[in-house]
Image: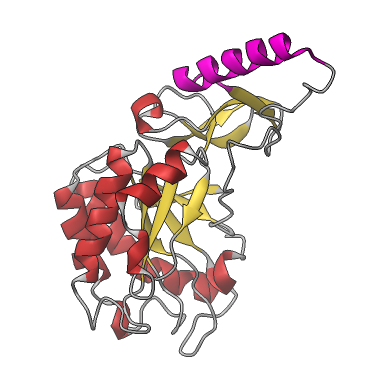
Amino acid sequence: MLRNKWGGKQLIVVIMVMTLVLASCSSKTTTGDLYTDDKNDQTPAENQTQDESQNSESNAGNRAFTEGGATMKAMTGPSVNGMPKINEVEGIMQLCDASGQPIQLRGMSTHGLQWFPGIINDNAFSALKNDFGANVIRLALYPNEGGGYIEDPSLKDLLIEGIDYAIANDMYAIVDWHIHNPGDPMHEEYSGGIEFFDEISTLYPNNDHIIYELANEPNPNAPGVSNDAAGWERVKEFCEPIVNMLRDKGNENLILVGSPNWSQRPT
Protein backbone atom coordinates (compact mmCIF):
# COMPACT_ATOMS: atom_id res chain seq x y z
CA MET A 1 0.00 0.00 0.00
CA LEU A 2 1.60 3.24 -1.13
CA ARG A 3 0.80 6.88 -0.70
CA ASN A 4 0.70 8.90 -3.89
CA LYS A 5 -0.26 12.48 -4.71
CA TRP A 6 -2.20 13.75 -7.68
CA GLY A 7 -2.44 17.51 -7.74
CA GLY A 8 -1.74 17.68 -4.01
CA LYS A 9 -4.59 15.27 -3.24
CA GLN A 10 -3.56 12.36 -1.08
CA LEU A 11 -4.92 8.90 -1.84
CA ILE A 12 -3.90 5.29 -1.60
CA VAL A 13 -2.59 3.20 -4.45
CA VAL A 14 -3.33 -0.42 -3.73
CA ILE A 15 -1.26 -3.36 -4.91
CA MET A 16 -3.27 -6.58 -4.67
CA VAL A 17 -5.95 -4.61 -2.91
CA MET A 18 -8.39 -7.31 -1.89
CA THR A 19 -6.29 -9.40 0.44
CA LEU A 20 -8.89 -8.95 3.15
CA VAL A 21 -8.87 -11.81 5.63
CA LEU A 22 -12.11 -13.41 6.77
CA ALA A 23 -11.10 -13.97 10.37
CA SER A 24 -13.37 -16.27 12.38
CA CYS A 25 -13.89 -15.31 15.99
CA SER A 26 -14.62 -18.96 16.82
CA SER A 27 -10.99 -19.83 16.02
CA LYS A 28 -8.43 -19.20 18.72
CA THR A 29 -5.60 -18.56 16.28
CA THR A 30 -5.81 -15.70 13.79
CA THR A 31 -3.44 -13.87 11.47
CA GLY A 32 -1.14 -11.54 13.35
CA ASP A 33 -1.12 -13.58 16.58
CA LEU A 34 -4.24 -11.93 17.94
CA TYR A 35 -4.44 -14.72 20.47
CA THR A 36 -3.80 -18.46 20.56
CA ASP A 37 -5.55 -21.39 22.23
CA ASP A 38 -3.31 -22.49 25.08
CA LYS A 39 -6.10 -23.79 27.33
CA ASN A 40 -5.44 -27.54 27.09
CA ASP A 41 -3.35 -27.55 30.28
CA GLN A 42 -5.79 -25.41 32.26
CA THR A 43 -8.55 -26.40 34.64
CA PRO A 44 -12.22 -25.70 33.71
CA ALA A 45 -12.26 -22.79 36.16
CA GLU A 46 -9.13 -21.32 34.57
CA ASN A 47 -10.64 -21.79 31.12
CA GLN A 48 -13.79 -19.95 32.17
CA THR A 49 -11.75 -17.10 33.65
CA GLN A 50 -9.70 -16.79 30.46
CA ASP A 51 -12.83 -16.87 28.27
CA GLU A 52 -14.49 -14.17 30.38
CA SER A 53 -11.36 -12.03 30.17
CA GLN A 54 -11.14 -12.40 26.39
CA ASN A 55 -14.84 -11.68 25.96
CA SER A 56 -14.53 -8.57 28.11
CA GLU A 57 -11.59 -7.32 26.05
CA SER A 58 -13.44 -8.09 22.82
CA ASN A 59 -16.54 -6.21 23.90
CA ALA A 60 -14.42 -3.23 24.88
CA GLY A 61 -12.81 -3.22 21.44
CA ASN A 62 -9.35 -3.15 22.95
CA ARG A 63 -7.74 -6.37 21.72
CA ALA A 64 -4.42 -5.84 20.04
CA PHE A 65 -1.86 -7.85 18.12
CA THR A 66 1.67 -7.29 16.89
CA GLU A 67 2.60 -7.39 13.22
CA GLY A 68 5.71 -5.97 11.59
CA GLY A 69 6.89 -4.63 14.92
CA ALA A 70 3.84 -2.40 15.44
CA THR A 71 0.98 -3.01 17.83
CA MET A 72 -2.40 -2.83 16.08
CA LYS A 73 -5.98 -2.83 17.24
CA ALA A 74 -7.89 -5.76 15.76
CA MET A 75 -11.48 -6.00 14.53
CA THR A 76 -12.72 -2.71 15.92
CA GLY A 77 -15.12 -0.79 13.72
CA PRO A 78 -15.81 2.83 12.81
CA SER A 79 -17.42 3.56 16.17
CA VAL A 80 -14.00 2.97 17.78
CA ASN A 81 -11.58 3.74 14.94
CA GLY A 82 -13.27 6.68 13.27
CA MET A 83 -12.21 7.44 9.70
CA PRO A 84 -9.10 5.44 8.74
CA LYS A 85 -6.11 7.20 7.27
CA ILE A 86 -2.52 6.52 6.24
CA ASN A 87 0.19 7.60 8.69
CA GLU A 88 3.89 6.95 9.03
CA VAL A 89 4.51 4.72 12.05
CA GLU A 90 8.08 3.72 12.90
CA GLY A 91 9.15 4.66 9.40
CA ILE A 92 6.47 2.61 7.65
CA MET A 93 3.32 3.95 5.99
CA GLN A 94 0.46 2.15 7.71
CA LEU A 95 -3.31 2.11 7.85
CA CYS A 96 -4.32 3.90 11.05
CA ASP A 97 -7.39 4.97 12.93
CA ALA A 98 -8.37 8.60 13.30
CA SER A 99 -5.95 9.01 16.22
CA GLY A 100 -2.97 7.56 14.34
CA GLN A 101 -3.02 4.08 15.93
CA PRO A 102 -2.27 1.28 13.40
CA ILE A 103 -5.29 -0.89 12.61
CA GLN A 104 -6.15 -3.78 10.33
CA LEU A 105 -9.37 -4.26 8.39
CA ARG A 106 -10.69 -7.80 8.11
CA GLY A 107 -13.73 -8.97 6.25
CA MET A 108 -14.94 -10.12 2.87
CA SER A 109 -16.16 -8.96 -0.51
CA THR A 110 -19.45 -9.69 -2.16
CA HIS A 111 -19.45 -11.10 -5.67
CA GLY A 112 -21.19 -9.00 -8.30
CA LEU A 113 -24.42 -7.74 -6.80
CA GLN A 114 -26.24 -8.52 -10.04
CA TRP A 115 -25.47 -12.23 -9.56
CA PHE A 116 -25.88 -12.60 -5.79
CA PRO A 117 -28.25 -9.87 -4.55
CA GLY A 118 -29.43 -12.06 -1.67
CA ILE A 119 -26.25 -11.40 0.30
CA ILE A 120 -27.54 -7.92 1.09
CA ASN A 121 -29.55 -8.59 4.25
CA ASP A 122 -29.19 -7.71 7.90
CA ASN A 123 -28.75 -11.31 9.05
CA ALA A 124 -25.72 -11.83 6.78
CA PHE A 125 -24.10 -8.56 7.82
CA SER A 126 -24.80 -9.22 11.49
CA ALA A 127 -23.22 -12.67 11.20
CA LEU A 128 -20.13 -11.21 9.54
CA LYS A 129 -19.75 -8.72 12.36
CA ASN A 130 -20.72 -10.79 15.39
CA ASP A 131 -19.85 -14.36 14.41
CA PHE A 132 -16.81 -13.81 12.20
CA GLY A 133 -15.47 -10.62 13.76
CA ALA A 134 -15.37 -8.71 10.46
CA ASN A 135 -15.04 -4.95 10.47
CA VAL A 136 -15.27 -4.34 6.71
CA ILE A 137 -17.30 -5.52 3.73
CA ARG A 138 -16.69 -4.68 0.10
CA LEU A 139 -19.73 -4.09 -2.10
CA ALA A 140 -18.87 -5.00 -5.70
CA LEU A 141 -20.89 -3.06 -8.28
CA TYR A 142 -20.10 -4.22 -11.81
CA PRO A 143 -21.06 -1.48 -14.27
CA ASN A 144 -21.32 -3.68 -17.32
CA GLU A 145 -20.98 -7.44 -16.91
CA GLY A 146 -23.84 -9.93 -16.67
CA GLY A 147 -26.69 -7.48 -16.24
CA GLY A 148 -24.70 -4.96 -14.23
CA TYR A 149 -25.43 -1.37 -13.27
CA ILE A 150 -25.70 0.00 -16.81
CA GLU A 151 -28.43 -2.50 -17.62
CA ASP A 152 -30.01 -2.53 -14.16
CA PRO A 153 -29.66 0.84 -12.35
CA SER A 154 -31.60 -0.57 -9.38
CA LEU A 155 -28.36 -2.26 -8.32
CA LYS A 156 -27.27 1.10 -6.96
CA ASP A 157 -30.18 0.96 -4.52
CA LEU A 158 -29.05 -2.52 -3.46
CA LEU A 159 -25.53 -1.20 -2.86
CA ILE A 160 -26.92 1.68 -0.80
CA GLU A 161 -28.89 -0.85 1.24
CA GLY A 162 -25.62 -2.70 1.82
CA ILE A 163 -23.94 0.51 3.01
CA ASP A 164 -26.77 1.03 5.49
CA TYR A 165 -26.44 -2.54 6.82
CA ALA A 166 -22.68 -2.03 7.21
CA ILE A 167 -23.26 1.18 9.16
CA ALA A 168 -25.88 -0.50 11.35
CA ASN A 169 -23.41 -3.29 12.15
CA ASP A 170 -20.42 -0.97 12.77
CA MET A 171 -18.44 -2.05 9.71
CA TYR A 172 -16.64 -0.15 6.99
CA ALA A 173 -18.16 -0.39 3.51
CA ILE A 174 -15.83 -0.42 0.51
CA VAL A 175 -17.83 1.04 -2.39
CA ASP A 176 -16.34 -0.76 -5.39
CA TRP A 177 -16.81 0.43 -8.99
CA HIS A 178 -15.76 -2.98 -10.26
CA ILE A 179 -13.62 -2.75 -13.38
CA HIS A 180 -12.85 -6.14 -14.86
CA ASN A 181 -13.78 -6.72 -18.51
CA PRO A 182 -12.83 -4.66 -20.43
CA GLY A 183 -9.76 -3.86 -18.37
CA ASP A 184 -9.34 -0.19 -19.37
CA PRO A 185 -11.02 2.17 -16.87
CA MET A 186 -11.31 4.74 -19.65
CA HIS A 187 -13.59 2.51 -21.71
CA GLU A 188 -16.93 4.20 -22.38
CA GLU A 189 -18.81 1.58 -20.34
CA TYR A 190 -17.18 2.98 -17.18
CA SER A 191 -17.88 6.61 -17.95
CA GLY A 192 -20.63 6.81 -15.34
CA GLY A 193 -18.13 6.38 -12.52
CA ILE A 194 -17.80 10.04 -11.58
CA GLU A 195 -21.58 10.52 -11.49
CA PHE A 196 -21.95 7.37 -9.37
CA PHE A 197 -19.35 8.43 -6.79
CA ASP A 198 -20.75 11.96 -6.75
CA GLU A 199 -24.15 10.57 -5.81
CA ILE A 200 -22.83 8.20 -3.13
CA SER A 201 -20.68 10.92 -1.57
CA THR A 202 -23.71 13.21 -1.49
CA LEU A 203 -25.75 10.56 0.32
CA TYR A 204 -22.90 9.85 2.77
CA PRO A 205 -20.83 13.04 3.00
CA ASN A 206 -17.43 12.46 4.62
CA ASN A 207 -18.88 9.42 6.41
CA ASP A 208 -16.47 7.47 8.63
CA HIS A 209 -17.84 4.14 7.36
CA ILE A 210 -17.15 4.70 3.65
CA ILE A 211 -14.04 3.68 1.69
CA TYR A 212 -14.08 4.39 -2.05
CA GLU A 213 -12.60 1.98 -4.60
CA LEU A 214 -12.44 3.62 -8.01
CA ALA A 215 -10.84 0.97 -10.22
CA ASN A 216 -10.27 -2.33 -8.51
CA GLU A 217 -8.15 -4.23 -11.04
CA PRO A 218 -7.16 -2.57 -14.33
CA ASN A 219 -5.94 -5.33 -16.61
CA PRO A 220 -5.15 -6.35 -20.21
CA ASN A 221 -8.68 -7.69 -20.98
CA ALA A 222 -9.27 -6.08 -24.38
CA PRO A 223 -9.51 -3.22 -24.62
CA GLY A 224 -7.26 -3.16 -21.59
CA VAL A 225 -4.30 -1.32 -20.10
CA SER A 226 -0.67 -2.30 -20.46
CA ASN A 227 1.46 -3.37 -17.51
CA ASP A 228 3.76 -0.36 -17.70
CA ALA A 229 3.91 3.36 -17.05
CA ALA A 230 1.54 4.02 -19.97
CA GLY A 231 -1.04 1.72 -18.37
CA TRP A 232 -0.73 3.58 -15.07
CA GLU A 233 -1.27 6.90 -16.85
CA ARG A 234 -4.46 5.46 -18.30
CA VAL A 235 -5.68 4.52 -14.82
CA LYS A 236 -4.83 7.99 -13.52
CA GLU A 237 -6.73 9.58 -16.40
CA PHE A 238 -9.89 7.84 -15.18
CA CYS A 239 -9.35 8.31 -11.45
CA GLU A 240 -8.02 11.86 -11.14
CA PRO A 241 -11.35 13.61 -11.88
CA ILE A 242 -13.14 11.38 -9.34
CA VAL A 243 -10.47 11.95 -6.68
CA ASN A 244 -10.64 15.71 -7.23
CA MET A 245 -14.43 15.70 -7.12
CA LEU A 246 -14.50 13.79 -3.83
CA ARG A 247 -11.85 15.97 -2.21
CA ASP A 248 -13.40 19.21 -3.48
CA LYS A 249 -16.67 18.16 -1.80
CA GLY A 250 -14.83 17.79 1.51
CA ASN A 251 -14.64 13.99 1.61
CA GLU A 252 -11.49 12.84 3.42
CA ASN A 253 -12.31 9.13 3.06
CA LEU A 254 -9.72 6.59 2.01
CA ILE A 255 -9.65 6.14 -1.77
CA LEU A 256 -8.42 2.85 -3.22
CA VAL A 257 -7.02 2.83 -6.74
CA GLY A 258 -5.94 -0.39 -8.41
CA SER A 259 -2.74 -0.53 -10.43
CA PRO A 260 -2.29 -2.23 -13.82
CA ASN A 261 -2.10 -6.02 -14.23
CA TRP A 262 -4.95 -6.71 -11.78
CA SER A 263 -3.47 -4.44 -9.10
CA GLN A 264 -0.10 -6.20 -9.12
CA ARG A 265 2.09 -3.47 -10.64
CA PRO A 266 4.13 -1.26 -8.26
CA THR A 267 3.67 2.41 -9.10
Give the left or right position of residue 11, taking residue 194 as reference.
Answer: right
Residue under the image location 59 percent in, 76 percent down: 227
* Up/down of 47 relative to 220, above or below: above
Residue under the image location 33 percent in, 82 percent down: 144
Could you say where residue 74 lies in the image, as x and y percent from the top left? 55, 30
- What coloring was used for the rendering? secondary structure
Residue under the image location 20 percent in, 55 percent down: 200
Q: Among all residues in the image, which is located at the extreme right?
A: 41
Q: Nearer the viewer, residue 78 or 213?
A: 78
Q: Is residue 176 visible?
A: no
Q: Is residue 203 visible?
A: yes
Give the left or right position of residue 119, taking residue 1 as reference.
Answer: left
State the count of labels: 0
Q: Nearer the viewer, residue 230 or 138?
A: 138
Could you say where residue 181 lies in the image, as x and y percent from the top left? 45, 83
Q: Among all residues in the image, which is located at the extreme front?
A: 44
Residue 206 lies in the magenta-colored region: no
* Up/down of 60 relative to 33, above or below: above
Could you say where residue 267 lies in the image, as x and y percent from the top left? 57, 60
Residue 48 lies in the magenta-colored region: yes
* Up/down of 129 relative to 66, above or below: below
**What is the magenta segment's predominant secondary structure?**
helix
* Up/down of 135 relative to 34, above or below: below
Q: Which region of the structure is painted magenta? A: 42-63
Give the left or right position of residue 160, taking residue 73 as reference.
Answer: left
Q: Nearer the viewer, residue 25 or 46?
A: 46
Residue under the image location 33 percent in, 67 percent down: 117
Give the left or right position of residue 70, taking residue 226 as reference.
Answer: right
Could you say where residue 139 lies in the image, as x and y percent from the top left? 37, 59
Q: Nearer the viewer, residue 22 or 43?
A: 43
